[in-house]
Amino acid sequence: MLRIKEKRERALGTKLFLKASRCNSPKCAMVRRPSKPGIHGGKKSRKSSSDFGRQLQEKQKVQISYGLNNRQMRKLFRGKKDTREILESLEKRLDNVLFRLGLADSRIVARQLINHGHILVKGKKVTIPSYRVTIGEVVSIDPNSRKLKMFESLELKLKKFEPPQWLRLDKEKSAGQLISQPEELNLPFDLKLVAEHYSR
C-alpha cells in the first residue's frame, strides 16, 4: 500500500513525507526516482494542466498527505472557502498531531499506533485517527505500550526533535499538548485550489 502511495507521490511530483525519516534522506522515492512512474515517466507532458487539472492535483496531494478518503474530503471542504479553518481541521487530527509531535515517524505510522490502541488523549485510549484534538488536551503513548520494541529509539529521536510552535512536547514523558491554533505551515499543496475544486 505504501509503495502505491509513493508511486502516486512521484506522479504528483511533490514530496508528501509519507515516510518522514526516509523522505529526509537519499532513500526518498522522490530523490531516487524523481521522474513520473511508467515507461514514459521521464518525458514532459506537452499539454499544460487546465485549472481543473491543477485543482485535482492539489486535492490528491491533500488526500494522500492526510490519508483521507473522498467522503472525508467532501465533508471537509464542501461549503467552506476559509482555508484557515480547513487547515486547522486537518492539523488538529490526532494522527497529524502525533506526527507533528515526533511521536510517530509519519501520519501512516500514527494511524497504525492509534488503531492498535497505543495512544492516549487526556489519559484515555482513543482509537480514532480523525479525532480532533482541542487546545489543552495532552496526547501521550500508553505506558503499557511504551515498553514495546517500536518505541525503543523514541527517547533518543525526541532529543533532537522540535515540534511546531503551536504544540508543546514533553520529551521525558513522550507526551505533547496542543497549546494554540495551528499556524500557517510550509505545506506541499495549495488549499485554495482544493477549495475551488469543491465549490464547482
Image: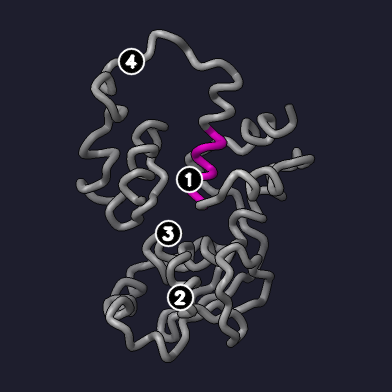
Which quarter of the picture shows residue 90?
Answer: bottom right
Circles 1, 3 touching at the beta carbon (< 8 Å): no
Kind of residue indicated by mark 1: Ile
Q: CA distance from mark 4 to mark 3?
A: 31 Å
Which is nearer the eye, 45 or 133?
Answer: 45
Circles 2, 1 touching at the beta carbon (< 8 Å): no
Kind of residue indicated by mark 3: Ile
Q: Which residues are magenta?
A: 58-66
Across and down, in percent, residue 133 comes to: 64, 69
Q: CA distance from mark 4 to mark 1?
A: 23 Å
**Which residue position is annotated with label 3?**
108
Which residue is found at the position 59% from the left and 57% from the top?
91
Lower sequence index among marks 2 and 3: 3
The mark closer to the camera, 2 or 3, is 2
Badge 3, how many Cα within 10 Å: few under 14, some, many 20+?
A: many
Lower sequence index among marks 4 and 1: 4
Which residue is found at the position 69% from the left and 30% from the top?
196
In screen coordinates, is 97 left or right of 74?
left
Judged from the image, the secondary structure of the residue bearing numbered disc 1 is helix
Q: CA distance from mark 1 to mark 3?
A: 10 Å
**Which residue position is annotated with label 1?**
64
Badge 1, how many Cα within 10 Å: few under 14, some, many 20+?
A: some
Circles 4, 3 touching at the beta carbon (< 8 Å): no
Which is nearer the eye, 154 or 149?
Answer: 149
Lower sequence index among marks 2 and 1: 1
**Which residue position is annotated with label 2?**
116
**Which residue position is annotated with label 4?**
44
Kind of residue indicated by mark 2: His
- For the question of whether residue 175 can be seen, the reply is no
